[in-house]
Image (cartoon, helix red, strand yellow):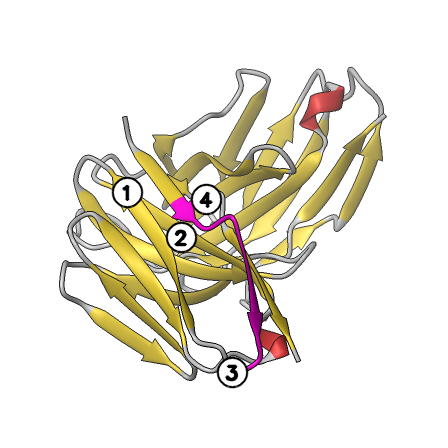
Amino acid sequence: DSGVTQTPKHLITATGQRVTLRCSPRSGDLSVYWYQQSLDQGLQFLIQYYNGEERAKGNILERFSAQQFPDLHSELNLSSLELGDSALYFCASSVDTSSGRAADTQYFGPGTRLTVL
Amino acid sequence: EDQVTQSPEALRLQEGESSSLNCSYTVSGLRGLFWYRQDPGKGPEFLFTLYSAGEEKEKERLKATLTKKESFLHITAPKPEDSATYLCAVYTGGFKTIFGAGTRLFVKA
């Protein structure tokens, strides 16, 4: 158990709908990362938040958005869902990757499996 | 363009047969390189973080090394429970994390 929690575990919805995925980081971790893992794409970095502010963006679609709240939990919002959005969505957290030179270890949650029908 | 390439895509070993997995990278400003193990349908499990060329880390049957262009994950005398997908990732100067496609390891008893 990494200490990172994600809800829900499974989500089944229809095309065109909107869903929200939730992530609670490990106690004390300030950074949260979101990833998408599909069979043909591997693990793709979407976005990183540090202490409530966006730090880096990866291959995140405009239909997707995220935020990190004052209590440091994060939510990933996916809208106008398409069949191709079906994937495992992972959240990870790390202690602090602020101005430091090095990378802090990212600990991953168990993921949310999204199925779009 | 930042890129991470893992080889081989799949590796089949007999129990006790040691081998190495490769991760080659091209990135702008490496902050760190990670190795993870992932079982089907589960989240990646952290193994190692390496920061600079020449660094080595060990844990049980696994040893990770880093050069300026690649990293190796050496598996000594593997057991069937080592069967999994091994993922390499780099954390770049621009705070992006880039994963390789992974190596699927199968260890037969």
Discs 1/4, front: 1
Q: N-terminal of the two: label 1 or label 3?
A: 3
- How far apart are the alpha carbons under marks 1 and 3? 29 Å
In the rendered image, residue A18, in percent from the top left (x then y), is placed at 73, 23
In the rendered image, residue A59, in percent from the top left (x then y), is placed at 46, 25
- How far apart are the alpha carbons under marks 4 and 2? 16 Å
Q: N-terminal of the two: label 1 or label 2?
A: 1
Task: Compare residues A101 and A67 and report the one nearer the observer.
Answer: A101
- Residue B13 in the magenta stretch? The answer is yes
Q: Does mark 2 fall on the same chain as mark 1?
A: yes
- How far apart are the alpha carbons under marks 3 and 4? 37 Å
The answer to whether one can see residue B8 in this image is: yes
Q: Does mark 2 fall on the same chain as mark 4?
A: no
Residue type indicated by callout 1: Tyr
User: Circle 1 is placed at which residue position?
Assistant: B25
Secondary structure beneath dot 1 equals: strand
Q: Does mark 4 fall on the same chain as mark 1?
A: no
Residue type indicated by callout 3: Gly
User: Circle 3 is placed at which residue position?
Assistant: B16
Q: Is residue B98 above or below residue A79?
A: below
User: Circle 4 is placed at which residue position?
Assistant: A33
Q: Few, some or many C-alpha atoms within 10 Å of disc 2 (few <14, some 14-19, many ≥20)?
A: many
Discs 3/2, front: 3
Q: Chain of mark 1?
A: B
- How far apart are the alpha carbons under marks 3 and 2? 23 Å
Q: Few, some or many C-alpha atoms within 10 Å of disc 3 (few <14, some 14-19, many ≥20)?
A: some
